[in-house]
Amino acid sequence: MLLIPCPHCGPRPETEFVYGGDARVKRPDPENSTDEQWTSYIYARDNPKGQHQELWLHNAGCHLWLIVERDTVSHAIGSVRAVREGQQ
Amino acid sequence: MVRERYSFLALAKHALTGHKNWQPAIRHPEPKSNYDVIVIGGGGHGLATAYYLAKLHGINKVALLERGWIGGGNTGRNTTIVRSNYLLEENANFYEHSLKLWEGLSSDLNFNVMFSQRSVINTCHTPAELEGTMRRYNAMRLNGIDAEFLTAAELKRRVPSINLGQDGSLRWPILAALSQPRGGVARHDAVAWGFARGADALGVDIIQNCEVTGFRRAADGRVIGVETNRGPIAASKVGVAVAGHSGHVMAMAGITLPIESHLLQAFVSEPVKPFLDVVISTGALHFYISQTDKGEVLLGGGLDGYNSYGQRGTIPNIQEVTSAATEMFPNISRLKWMRQWAGIMDMTMDGSPIIGKTPIPGLFFDGGWCYGGFKAIPGSGWCFAHTIANGEPHPLNASFTLERFGRSAVIDEKGAGPFPKAH
């Protein structure tokens, strides 16, 4: 069981959250991008063995989208911050 | 070395000498400096690939490199289900080919893989699921694959201990079920050992405790071998079959895959007398159940839900699967879980595997098996060996390319979009 320290609600169990996947995937500029960039955005994932920046929605809590740094081997959680407009 | 065949006569002969003189099943050779083909990954897929390369394509100078021990990853961590009950033609043809190989595997390998064709049954719990499953039944029959549609009453006759839930005890009562009678289960370790023994007898060097740390490339970019913790090994063709760690290994070649690694758990109860002689799976409640030859009740469910290489599951999924299973099988509610484990799944973005060439000449890839790798072992090895030997895919795996994602030619059984959750 992950205990995710929500910056708004405090530490809460993983069952309150919805996983949103890799937080570093960037949507390409629709006006100015190639097919390869879209393919990469939709499908390709770095899938690291180790530190992973990932999105979590605190669905049963404050409804903030969070960027959680978590180790994919030990599951240890590092920094947690809210996604703010313009920051992602 | 002449390989002694396993038989009743051999068993009787060795019984006379106290079973002290059996040949080792495989050799433990030191790696040579160069081979025709290197296969990375000593799970079922890699071992089957090496076996079929030697047996069907006459390529015997093969090294199979395994970081740990053979069959120690997902091959030994699954729920051993074998089936070919797919909707889409690409999947149906591929998995049916694999199922046909399973049917002759024990005799082909001279190793009992304990393949038991006891029926794989999917239950339907909503009108929408019923229609979707009926469509899949029709697709299976059109593809020449065995299938039977069972009414709830027929299912109850076949599986007396099941709770249909029509008295209100299931939130979504069972309406009907789809059965594939030729589906079933097999002994997972035996599959790895059988392919290993078969490959070794044909000259394949199976090298355990040998971790690949990088790819060796020529000036023009093609692969000419690998770096390992036991020194460099040269080969003009390298096949990667390391599902679970595909992203990790392919990153060494600079290739980013449409794959995320996720945990899938399974659990077994204490052993009890036989009461369940089929495999049951339910998409609505999301678990699958069978009883092992040892009598344990074996259960699996959905993914834990977030990227992980941890090989151990977390509690919420155990609770979810257990609560669903005890609703449908109330008679297991007082059993104790005996063991629990998790495997690392290569979850692709369309739920279908990748077997084929890569953008790098000489480098071939087999992975992305999602939940379904175990049943695919013989078919995957067969197709991957063909692809490596000929440099081009077989028609059976021609659609399972890495490039399909860029062309939006995905093989998406669920039609559910680019999420690494399907299977």
Image (cartoon, rainbow, N blue to C red):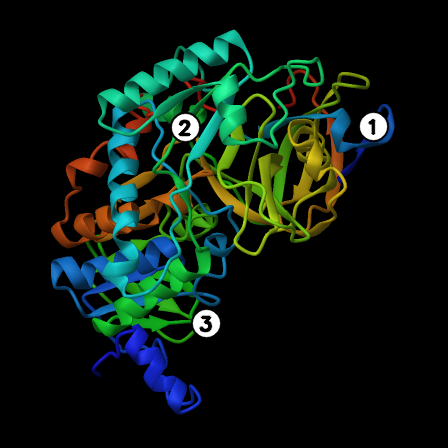
Which residue bears the numbered disc 2?
B179
Q: Which is in the foreground here, disc 1 or disc 2? A: 2
| Crowd rating for badge 1 (residues with CA inside 10 Å; few <14, some 14–19, many 20+) | few
Q: Which mark is residue B217?
A: none
The three-letter code of the residue at mark 1 reads Pro
Say if residue B224 shows up in the picture.
no
Which residue bears the numbered disc 1?
A7
Task: Indicate the quadrant containing the N terminus of chain B: top left, top right, bottom left or bottom right.
Answer: bottom left
Q: Which is in the foreground here, disc 3 or disc 2? A: 2
What is the x, y in percent for residue B156? 54, 25
Q: Is residue B150 left or right of residue B291?
A: left
The three-letter code of the residue at mark 2 reads Ser
Chain designation of label 3: B
**Tag 2 secondary structure:** strand
Residue B113 placement: quadrant: bottom left
Measure how far apart labels 3 and 2 are at the Cα level. 42 Å
Chain designation of label 1: A
Measure how far apart labels 1 and 3 are at the Cα level. 44 Å
**Tag 3 secondary structure:** loop
Q: Nearer the viewer, residue B35 or A45?
A: B35
**Tag 1 secondary structure:** loop
Q: Which mark is residue B209?
A: 3
